[in-house]
Image (spheres, rainbow, N blue to C red):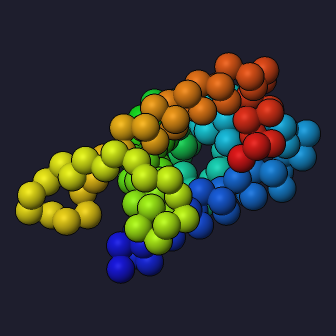
Amino acid sequence: ATFIFLVLPCLMLGYLGQAAFLMKNLDKSEQVFFSSVPGKSDICILKILLILVFSFKKINNKRQMATDGAFWPVFIIANIAALIASRVMTSATFACIKQSTALGCFPRLKIVHTSRKFMGQIYIPVMNWFLLVFCLLVVTTIASTSEIGNAY
């Protein structure tokens, strides 16, 4: 239910906003996400999303978008989303490895049950270190943000 009513609409708004940005700015297709975040210039590109999220303010008796301060809220929300995604990735990795080990498809690893109350809360130290090393390798080998965008 949370996915249908919260996650899916947020993803749809994000992707539709990026599509609207690309329709207006075909020359900025290398870094769509970073280019589409409202800043001090090129502000009115994401009008549809900004109307839904941000309020208007009066400047010189004209209604203009109040997006000068929109960069930091978007930046903070993107960081929170990255934290949630990293937590989900580690949890999913631990769950998949536990199931694979139980089925005999993966070598036996040390699995630490972190809670006596909840059965599914586990921690696998080896996989945690593997994820750390893999992420560090990816971050150090990617030379530019356009490569990150292509990988995405």
On-image quarter of the N terminus: bottom left
Residue drawn at x 55%, y 65% is 105
For residue 98, side relative to residue 50 (left or right): left
52 or 73, which is in the foreground?
73
For residue 68, side relative to residue 114 (left or right): right
For the question of whether residue 54 can be seen, the reply is no
Residue drawn at x 15%, y 64% is 118
24 or 7, which is in the foreground?
7
Q: How many marks?
A: 0
Q: Position of residue 114 (x, y in %)?
A: 18, 49
Q: Where is residue 58 in the image (x, y as percent from the top left)?
A: 46, 40
For residue 28, side relative to residue 33 (left or right): right
For residue 126, side relative to residue 140 (left or right): left
Using the rendered view, name the quadrant where residue 30 is placed. top right
Q: Position of residue 96 (x, y in %)?
A: 47, 62
Q: Residue furthest right?
A: 27
Residue drawn at x 68%, y 42% is 33
Q: Is residue 123 above or below residue 92?
A: above
Residue drawn at x 46%, y 41% is 127
Q: Residue furthest left?
A: 117
Q: Position of residue 82 (x, y in %)?
A: 47, 42
For the question of whether residue 44 can be seen, the reply is yes
